[in-house]
């Protein structure tokens, strides 16, 4: 699986062309979206989550999607709230990954030392 396919998995249900998704990956630092995705790398995971967060933020910037829909007996409402909840989830996940899964070492320091 390559990086582009992994981002498509994360942004499932959002229809964007591979070229558009490649731009999101490039903005996060992946110059070759067809390179192999390394699932064991927390850096690669952070990049995919950050790119999917950018995709969701782009969707959230489209006001025509923020209305409620009703078709036949099915209604889709509160899309904006659900989208914002997912954005908040991804932001929390990215913050926790940056703290808990750092590949470069500890993010803590000692202010006072004896």
Image: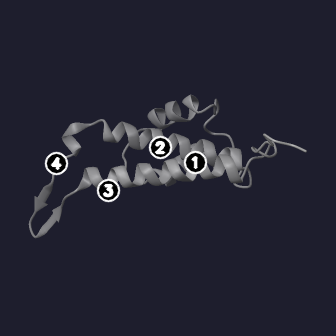
Residue contact at pointers 4 and 1, CB within 8 angstroms: no
- The disc at residue 78 is none
Mark 2 vs 1: CB contact within 8 A: yes
Q: Which residue bears the numbered disc 3? A: 82
Q: How far from the left and from the top, in percent, is residue 6?
A: 57, 50
Secondary structure beneath label 2: helix
How far separated are the C-alphas under marks 3 and 2? 14 Å
Which badge, 3 or 4, comes first in the chain's sequence?
Answer: 4
In terms of sequence position, does the residue under pointer 3 or pointer 2 come before the other? 2
Distance from label 3 to label 1 (Cα)?
18 Å
Q: Tag 1 or tag 3, which sits nearer the N-term?
A: 3
CA gap, disc 4 and disc 1: 28 Å
Q: Which mark is residue 53?
A: 2
At a point 14% along the width and 55% down the height, the residue shown is 69
Q: Quadrant of the C terminus?
A: top right
User: From where the camera sits, is residue 2 visible?
Assistant: no
Q: Position of residue 26 (x, y in %)?
A: 57, 30
* Above or below 45: residue 29: above
Q: Nearer the viewer, mark 2 or mark 1?
A: 1
Of tags 4 and 1, the one toward the viewer is 1
Give the label on residue 94, or none. 1
The label on residue 67 is 4
Task: Determine the secondary structure under disc 3.
Answer: helix
């Amino acid at each position: 699986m390559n990086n582009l396919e992994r981002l498509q998995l994360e942004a499932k249900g959002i229809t964007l062309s591979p070229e558009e998704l490649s731009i999101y990956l490039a903005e996060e630092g992946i110059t070759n979206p067809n390179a192999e995705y390394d699932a064991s790398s927390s850096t690669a995971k952070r990049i995919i989550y950050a790119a999917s967060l950018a995709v969701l933020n782009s969707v959230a910037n489209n006001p025509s999607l923020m209305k409620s829909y009703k078709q036949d007996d099915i209604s889709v409402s509160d899309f904006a709230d659900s989208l914002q909840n997912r954005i908040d989830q991804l932001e929390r996940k990215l913050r926790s990954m940056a703290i808990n899964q750092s590949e470069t070492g500890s993010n803590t320091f000692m202010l006072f030392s004896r």
